[in-house]
Image: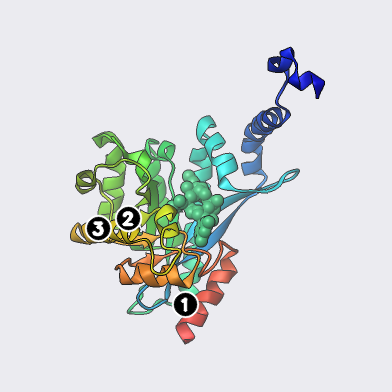
Amino acid sequence: RAKSAGGNRFELADPEADARAITRHGLTTALPAALDRNEFFIEYQPLVHLGDGSVRGAEALVRWLHPQHGVLGPDRFIPLAEHTGLIVPLGRWVLDQSVRQAKQWQERHGGNDATGPLRINVNLSPCQLSHPGLVQDTVDILERAGVSPDALCLEVTESALIGADDDLLKPLRQLAEMGVDIALDDFGTGYSNLANLRRLPVSILKLDRSFTQGMQQFPADPVDLKIVEGIVSLAHSLNLAVTVEGVETGAQAEQLRILGCDTAQGWYYARPGPPERLHELALVDATG
Ligand code: C2E
Ligand code: MG
Ligand code: MG
Ligand code: MG
């Protein structure tokens, strides 16, 4: 106590910061072996059509079952994997697993004329975008699994595409031409010039959770409503579909539906979970 109040306080270590740095270092060095040892697993969170409530697919969210630290969320290790380059093989693994999983769902549910086959959304980090193997790897993964490119959506954050030059956009364009959907994730948190959207090969805007949070009360804040309304009408006029993240209540879902958003995702429908959970949700859905 006396010591921390004394003149040498600048020499005192911050134990928490130290622990964080040690863990970061430990996690970084453990990452490559973790991939070999199969310590990563994927949870799936359903994507629900706001108009009719049907489950249309799911987003793949990676987790690490660390032997000492337990289950770690992607925010704990994706930045480290990006820093070391491990994100490329890890991202490829996530894509491969998720696409195979989608195949299993599709085989079980057979699809339906109105909803189409169940779809899979996979997050892509900026390092994967600039990796030359992306397009070929994606083609190979889809072919091997027997999944149509239309059933895949790759999510790229708005910030990853801000100021992106043509070299960076080229693989996305190629994928989009094949029929893969590209979604702009966490939309509204960056500073993209809305006019810039026309230049990007995206077909879906994923409105960031912060907008959904503004819809917590009923009726929602009128300014928030206006902003979302504006984004939705701009998106639709550019032929983009709008997905909303972070829907936690029925009131939010209802307001977002009224505002014309197309698809929603959030705890109100389901938390991310094991793949069998999607079977149950989609089945309940199919049988009423
Ligand atoms: P994201 O792509 O924006 O994913 C949505 C995040 O919101 C997920 O966090 C999800 O669990 C959380 N979420 C979903 N519904 C709700 C809700 O109703 N309320 C609240 N409060 N949160 C909700 P998670 O799983 O921790 O993932 C965090 C981020 O990590 C993702 O954000 C994504 O950017 C990244 N990520 C996850 N998996 C991968 C991956 O395989 N590759 C890459 N590159 N990034 C990934
Ligand atoms: Mg995402
Ligand atoms: Mg998101
Ligand atoms: Mg987000």
Identify which amino acid the numbered label 1 is placed on: His
Which of pointers 2 and 1 indicates the residue nearer the eye?
2
For mark 3, give the secondary structure. helix
For mark 1, give the secondary structure. helix
- Name the residue beneath numbered marker 1: 109
Residues at badges 3 and 2 in contact (C-beta under 8 Å)? no
Residue lying at 56% horizontally and 44% vertically, measured from the top left: 75
Crowd around label 2: few <14 · some 14–19 · many ≥20 (10 Å): many
Measure the C-alpha gap from mark 3 to mark 2: 13 Å
Residue 82 visible in the current orientation: yes
- Name the residue beneath numbered marker 3: 230
Q: For the view shown, which residue lies furthest in the bottom direction?
A: 288
Identify which amino acid the numbered label 2 is placed on: Leu
- Residue 24, percent across and down? 64, 32
Of the numbered discs 3 and 2, the one sitting upstream in the chain is 2
- Residue 4, percent across and down? 76, 21
Crowd around label 1: few <14 · some 14–19 · many ≥20 (10 Å): some
Which of pointers 3 and 2 indicates the residue nearer the eye?
3
Mark number, residue 171 = none
Q: Is residue 229 above or below residue 138?
A: below
Mark number, residue 205 = 2
- Residue in front for this viewpoint, 56 or 231: 231
- Residue in front for this viewpoint, 191 or 4: 4
Q: Is residue 58 above or below residue 55?
A: above
Q: For the view shown, which residue lies furthest in the right direction?
A: 2
For mark 2, give the secondary structure. strand
- Residue 117, percent across and down? 39, 71
- Residue in front for this viewpoint, 200 or 250: 250
The quadrant the N terminus occupies is top right
